[in-house]
Image (cartoon, rainbow, N blue to C red):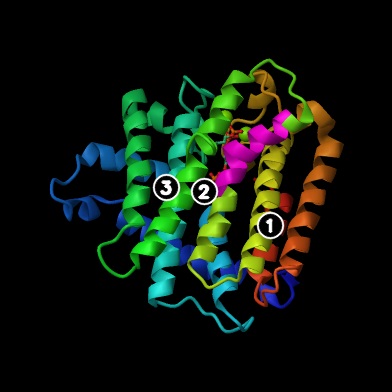
Amino acid sequence: MRRHNGLDLAAWSAAHLARIEAALRRWVSLEASANSEHGAPAALIAAMRYAVLDGGKRLRPLLVLAAAEAASSPHPNALPAGEGAADEAALRAACAVELIHAYSLVHDDMPCMDNDVLRRGKPTVHVKFGAASALLAGDALQALAFELLTPEHGMPAGQQAALCRLLARAAGSAGMAGGQAIDLASVGLALTESELREMHRLKTGALLQASVMMGAACGKASSQARAALKTYGAAIGLAFQVVDDILDVTADSVTLGKTPGKDADQHKPTYVSLLGLERSSAYAQELLDQALAALAQSGLPNTQALQGLARLVVKRAN
Ligand code: IPE
Ligand code: IPE
Ligand code: MG
Ligand code: MG
Ligand code: MG
């Protein structure tokens, strides 16, 4: 296993993924909804669980936890995953971002958007449950994300508000939803590089950057560190969609867990259509360098996981 700066990213990820998966299973469940006043229909919860569980790289939750650790710990090797109040807030933030992401995928795949039949190696939610259930599962996942960030006990009100603000901004019209609107309006058009960058920043970059900043909001980062993490988040956020565009052309369906070749089929402007494969890869590498440089300037001693995740964003196979 490759190590950078002493951290075994696979081992780090495995420990954190276990907590993320367990929390998602617990929070997206009939039992959790039964705790509320009215309970929820089992069929809707089934569609939500199908959308969220058993698949997904969980990159956004890992970024939340890595940023929370970087912003909390003065000692590089001092942080096993714990059960304290700060850990609980970061875990809630991690799952909240993943729920927004999962909802965005459910809607992205619907016939009125990208019309995709395969996601995370399974039939898409609308194929399995029908369009109305897919729409409602997305709606309910979005609401649940904000419910997770606002527990009655254990998180200060100011922290809850800060996390909600970051997530709402990144998910809404000036973030993911806005970027998706630009994406749909851009079909068949040749965007300039700056227009394409803006679209990718909104539709994908905003939520990845918010993951980093929500993690930081669970720690005690200085304003210098926050500014550096913001730069890091912007760079990997954009890099993520550049690589998504590349993989749509280069990867096969089994590796990808979704239908390759969709972007060209649907006449979507992408980095590959604008720059070609080679320059797109070089750009992703350039963004990785920017992200790593930002971490180096953050003044934070414990950024190994963030470094590893940035490399993963650019080097991933799916
Ligand atoms: C795919 O995201 C959609 C984009 C925002 C490009 P991911 O590649 O993170 O999808 P999962 O969560 O691993 O399935
Ligand atoms: C989707 O971009 C970004 C979202 C906000 C969901 P894509 O449409 O390229 O994502 P994939 O390739 O279907 O995962
Ligand atoms: Mg799309
Ligand atoms: Mg799509
Ligand atoms: Mg894509």
Q: Which stretch did the figure color magenta?
A: 195-207
Q: Disc 3 vs disc 1: which is toward the camera?
A: 1
* Amino acid marked by disc 1: Tyr
Above or below for 26 versus 185:
below
Q: Is mark 2 within 8 Å of ligand 1?
A: yes
Most foreground residue, 79 or 252? 79
Please report contact status of discs 3 and 2: CB closer than 8 Å, yes or no.
no
Mark 1 residue crowding within 10 angstroms, few (<14) / some (14–19) / many (20+): many
On screen, 117 above or below 213? above
Q: Secondary structure at mark 3?
A: helix
Amino acid type at circle 3 is Leu
Q: Earlier in the sequence, mark 3 or mark 2?
A: 2
Circle nearer the viewer, 2 or 1: 1
- Whether 275 is drawn above or below 84: the answer is above
Going 51% across and 57% down the picture, which residue do you hit? 61
* Tags 3 and 1 touching, CB below 8 Å: no
> Depth check: 222 or 40 in front?
222
Crowd tier of the residue under label 3, counting other residues whose Cα lies within 10 Å: few below 14, some 14–19, many 20 or above:
many
Residue 198 in which image quadrant:
top right
Q: Which residue is mark 3?
A: 99
Describe the element under mark 2 as helix, strand or loop.
loop
Quadrant into which the N terminus falls: bottom right
- CA gap, disc 2 and disc 1: 22 Å
Of the residues under marks 3 and 1, which one precedes in the sequence? 3
List the residue tagged with mark 1.
232
Q: Secondary structure at mark 1?
A: helix
Give amino acid for label 2: Gly
Tag shown at residue 56? 2
Quadrant of the image occupied by residue 297: bottom right
Q: Give the residue drawn at x 48%, y 48%.
A: 55
Distance from the alpha carbon under mark 3 to that under mark 1 = 22 Å
Task: Reply yes or no: does residue 136 show up in magenta.
Answer: no
